[in-house]
């Protein structure tokens, strides 16, 4: 079956301040394909180019060279770029900074209203989005300025979810949130992917999140794509992750430690459950004399 | 626009100008600006132009980058040139309907255009080659004698320092907000004046609140590091006038005398 990818990039290169002493190569020859309906994780250390890359996905940035197409449309055309906001929702880092209205309702309704929806539909979407991020309806009439950082973060994310775009890109939505609030947001995203087929692109530092939620993962290092594929394969390579400035997930780090002590597991587990199984299997397969 | 060099940007380059004492640079900038404004004879105009050319070359920054700062201003430059030419009374060389072009008008307009270009270049050299911190330190040191007249020079310099520090912050914050609100479908270019002004609300309100919050945080950060207005402070990097600094100031004084 033919399925159009959400994003396809060919030799995408992005250079900031080209031709000046401040010139920085942010992205270099990125070839990437993100299938539609996928939960895609993008990982890498700070400054590896993750944020720059995703800003190409909704037309905010244009490549210095190379091609980017989103839902089959080349973003080098202005018309294609200008309509992308209605198809790709983008949640920036610390999105609570973008809240401007005097009530939570008005702020979440900003995006849906710009889509030209009638007020009934807007109201419905605001309420759905609020539920998705786990906030009570009682909050709608409150002035956002009085809310705590974590709650305003969720309000800002709800403002993007309420547009119900076929694709969502989130730049570290959990940074600085308590673990429960973070989990709630990630679960809501997973639900959107499974129930509505929304494509999710998640930027994160936490590889545990990738293991739990993503179907595909790509690793960026200093503007270059050094690995991509299924999390079970990519994340099972501790040297690759450490080289990219990332902390391997606990089971991977543990397997590595075991092998440095002379205990070799016969698989490369990425989840805790797989690790337990691998240890058990290795233990059973080892003869009493080898112990 | 967000990806090009603007006025006031520091460019890290290894050049003799970058290595100069910021006080010398500030003095040379002021002297050159004065020379440009007072120069009336051809000899003076020629030497200042040569001097500016020499300084530009010494910064080792590509000329294209200097050209970039004129891009937003060329309309202003051309308009003032035309006004000066048209409204300077003199013997007409050419009549275009009600407008008359005179030799004195052309000379006055040309001189003003030259002055503006030179002043922009001189200011660009200073900001391209000097960090804001260096600049405010230099200003503080040069104005320190005024402290004897009970003028709070150090506090004044700190205020300038903080203001300069907020320029990039303001820039980053604006860039973020434009991108974030455009991603929610805000269009800053649609409709008439009224609609556009209304369209700016999602941009301006968070910009102001975010900047005020940052300022508040900065004030706290300064206080917990014991900053007090009026207290005596020392610096890690003492400034030192070296031979090139003396030479540059001296050369500039000579040029000023030639131009007078």
Image (spheres, coloured by chain):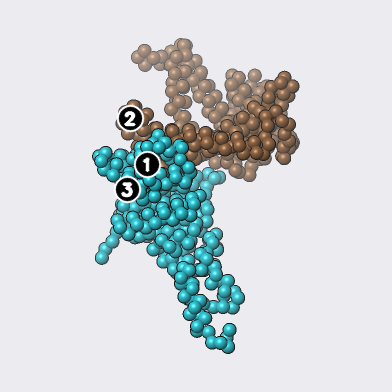
Expressed as whole percent of the image width and height from the top left, the position of residue B237 reads: 72, 39
Find the distance from the CA under tag 3 to the CA under tag 1: 13 Å
Q: Nearer the viewer, residue B110 or A193?
A: A193
> Residue under mark 3: which chain is it in?
A
Q: Is residue B152 above or below residue A246?
A: above
Question: Which quadrant of the rendered structure holds the C terminus of chain B?
Answer: top right
> Residue under mark 1: which chain is it in?
A
Q: Residue at x 59, y 74 (%)?
A: A260
Find the distance from the CA under tag 1 to the CA under tag 2: 32 Å
> Which chain is displayed in brown in the rendered image?
B
Are the two marked residues, 3 and 1, in contact with CB atoms closer than 8 angstroms? no
Q: Nearer the viewer, residue B24 or A30?
A: A30
Residue A138 is labelled as 1
Secondary structure beneath label 3: helix
Label 2 crowd (10 A; few <14 / some 14-19 / many >=20): few
Residue at numbered disc 2: B195
Q: Residue at x 54, y 37 (%)?
A: B214
Residue B250 in view of the camera: yes
Secondary structure beneath label 2: helix
Secondary structure beneath label 1: helix
User: Quick check: do tags 2 and 3 share a chain?
Assistant: no
Disc nearest the viewer among 3 and 1? 1
Residue at numbered disc 3: A128
State how many labels appear: 3
Expressed as whole percent of the image width and height from the top left, the position of residue B196 reads: 35, 30
User: Quick check: do tags 1 and 2 share a chain?
Assistant: no
Q: Residue at x 33, y 55 (%)?
A: A192
């Amino acid at each position: 079956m033919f399925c159009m990818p959400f994003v396809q990039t060919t030799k995408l290169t992005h250079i900031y301040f080209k031709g000046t002493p401040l010139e920085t190569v942010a992205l270099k020859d990125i070839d990437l394909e993100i299938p539609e309906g996928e939960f895609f994780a993008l990982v890498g250390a700070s400054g590896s180019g993750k944020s720059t890359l995703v800003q190409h996905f909704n037309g905010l940035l244009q490549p210095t060279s190379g091609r980017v197409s989103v839902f089959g449309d080349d973003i080098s055309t202005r018309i294609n770029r200008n309509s992308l906001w209605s198809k790709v929702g983008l949640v920036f880092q610390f999105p609570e900074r973008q809240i401007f209205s005097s009530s939570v309702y008005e702020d979440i309704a900003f995006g849906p209203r710009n889509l030209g929806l009638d007020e009934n539909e807007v109201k419905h979407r605001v309420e759905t989005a609020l539920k998705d991020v786990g906030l009570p309806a009682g909050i709608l009439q409150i002035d956002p300025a009085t809310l705590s950082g974590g709650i305003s973060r969720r309000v800002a994310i709800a403002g993007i979810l309420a547009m119900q775009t076929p694709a969502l890109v989130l730049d570290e939505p959990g940074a600085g949130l308590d673990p429960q609030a973070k989990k709630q947001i990630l679960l809501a995203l997973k639900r959107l992917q499974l129930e509505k087929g929304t494509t999710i692109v998640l930027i994160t530092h936490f590889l545990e999140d990738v293991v739990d939620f993503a179907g595909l993962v790509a690793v960026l290092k200093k503007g270059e794509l050094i690995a991509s594929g299924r999390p079970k394969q990519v994340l099972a390579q501790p040297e690759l992750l450490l080289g990219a400035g990332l902390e391997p997930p606990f089971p991977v780090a543990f397997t590595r430690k075991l092998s440095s002590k002379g205990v070799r597991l016969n698989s490369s587990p990425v989840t805790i459950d797989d690790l337990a199984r691998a240890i058990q299997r290795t233990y059973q397969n080892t003869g009493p004399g080898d112990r | 626009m967000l990806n090009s060099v603007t006025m006031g940007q520091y460019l890290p380059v290894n050049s003799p100008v970058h290595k100069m004492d910021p006080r010398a640079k500030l003095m040379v900038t002021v002297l050159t600006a004065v020379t440009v404004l007072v120069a009336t004879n051809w000899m003076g105009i020629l030497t200042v132009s040569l001097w500016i050319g020499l300084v530009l070359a010494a910064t080792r920054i590509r000329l294209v980058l200097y050209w970039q700062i004129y891009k937003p201003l060329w309309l202003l430059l051309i308009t003032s040139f035309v006004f000066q030419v048209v409204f300077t009374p003199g013997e007409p060389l050419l009549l275009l309907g009600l407008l008359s072009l005179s030799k004195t008008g052309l000379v006055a307009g040309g001189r003003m255009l030259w002055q503006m270009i030179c002043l922009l270049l001189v200011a660009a050299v200073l900001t391209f080659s000097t960090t804001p911190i260096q600049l405010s330190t230099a200003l503080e040191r040069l104005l320190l004698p005024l402290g004897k007249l009970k003028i709070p020079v150090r506090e004044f310099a700190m205020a300038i320092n903080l203001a300069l520090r907020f320029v990039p912050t303001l820039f980053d914050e604006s860039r973020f907000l434009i991108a974030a609100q455009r991603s929610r479908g805000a269009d800053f270019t649609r409709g008439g004046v009224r609609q556009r002004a209304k369209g700016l609300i999602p941009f301006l309100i968070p910009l102001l609140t975010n900047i005020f919050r940052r300022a508040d945080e900065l004030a706290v950060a300064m206080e917990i590091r014991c900053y007090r207005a009026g207290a005596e402070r020392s610096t890690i990097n003492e400034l030192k006038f070296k031979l090139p600094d003396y030479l540059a100031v001296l050369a500039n004084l000579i040029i000023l005398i030639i131009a007078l």
